[in-house]
Amino acid sequence: MDYNVNNEGFYGEFGGAYIPEILYSNVENLKNNYLRIIDDDDFKVEFDSLMRDYVGRPSPLYFAKRLSDKYRTRIYLKREDLNHTGAHKINNTVGQILLAQRMGKTRIIAETGAGQHGLATATVCALKGLKCIVYMGETDVARQQLNVRKMKMLGAEVRPVSSGNKTLKDATNEAIRDWCCNPSDTHYIIGSTVGPHPYPDMVTRFQSIISKEIKSQLSEKEGRNYPDYLIACVGGGSNAAGSFYHYLNDTRVKLIGVEAAGLGIDTGKTAATIHLGKRGIIHGSRTFVMQDEDGQITEPYSVSAGLDYPGIGPVHANLFVTQRAEYLAVTDGEALDAALELTQLEGIIPALESSHALAVFGKKKFKPDDVIVLTLSGRGDKDMEILDC
Ligand SMILES: *Cc1c(COP(=O)(O)O)cnc(C)c1O
């Protein structure tokens, strides 16, 4: 079985490009050019050098000794929290800004939830001197003030969105609307493995640097280039997809994705899309969607703004139905406990999103000689208001 996207843009039955007519030529243009551009030598040289000298890659693979002792297993953390701007999002925005430039685009739009993707987009727009507009739900604007201030300082315009429950889904709707009105000069930098084909595949490729590095770092530290388990949190699914990419067809490696249960998957206040979602279409992609009986998208909830999304990348929908990966749901409370635990055992303050992945150790038993790599997708600075109480 091949778990990658096929020529039509599908992962099994999921994915595709369900878009309004007006966006057709933009998406088609991207689809016809992205592979050629990112395989180009000139692109590779610039991408690699920015990854190294600007983002600070390779990110370390850190053996977490005290955490490993506590859970009687062997835990490595892939330190995406140490990247410039504090999360994995920058890997993708660097890739997409280089792509946008090569496609002659001059105006960049983005949606953001926690603000990490908006921040990473505003950052690369400053780097390249391109105009940047970031759509962000009003709820998220209020709970992620630090990132809003950074985006503004970087020269981006932050447009608050007041529809729906004023979070990521609503910001995404507005960004798509903007793209419809400005199809020729604008590139839409989507921040996760969601949206119409080719976005899920394109974002996965830019994030796949995570598993490429894990391979060589594990060889060095363990004498073999694969772990027994990979664990990552899943919002739209990009840090997980990047962590899984080079191991997708290596079934010695068990894959675990962790989604946000919010107050609990049965409480109605949740973002556990894999557990609760039904097949549907969201933001141009056929996948699992949290929806009511009439097919109306239901409002997701998580303490973590980066996981508060009612859809899931089509690659993960397929990994779930084929049982290639296992998906667990972690509550707000479990994630907060795991954040405090990592902080006090290892001296690392994790993002709330990443804390959901860390909570797996309290829910699932591993063997003493299992080698586990957990992707620490981001750092906790942006979440201090919530973490520190
Ligand atoms: C955005 C974000 C996530 C969730 O996005 P994915 O696309 O699922 O990776 C996870 N962790 C952090 C730190 C984020 O900023």
Image (cartoon, rainbow, N blue to C red):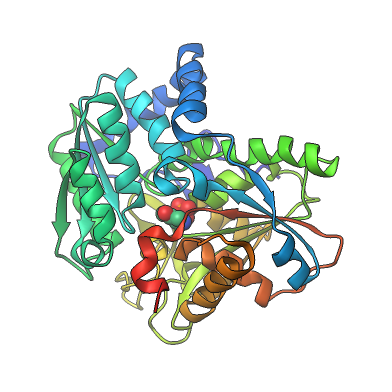
Compared with residue 68, is residue 5 higher up or lower down, i.e. above or below?
above
Name the spot of residue 222 as percent of width and height, x first. 83, 44
Q: Nearer the viewer, residue 43 or 12?
A: 43
Q: Which residue extends farthest bottom?
A: 267
Quadrant in the rendering for residue 245: top right
Compared with residue 226, is residue 352 higher up or lower down, i.e. above or below?
below
Identify the residue at horizontal 51%, vertical 46% (top origin).
82
Left or right, 178 with respect to 231, comes to: left
On the question of residue 309 being in view, the answer is: no
Identify the residue at horizontal 84%, vertical 41% (top origin).
224
Q: Nearer the viewer, residue 183 or 370?
A: 370
Identify the residue at horizontal 36%, vertical 64% (top origin).
305
| Quadrant of the image containing the C terminus | bottom left
| Quadrant of the image containing the N terminus | top right
Quadrant in the rendering for residue 209: top right
Name the spot of residue 279 as percent of width and height, x first. 45, 64
The quadrant of the rendered image in which ligand 1 is seen is bottom left
Name the spot of residue 153 as percent of width and height, x first. 19, 43
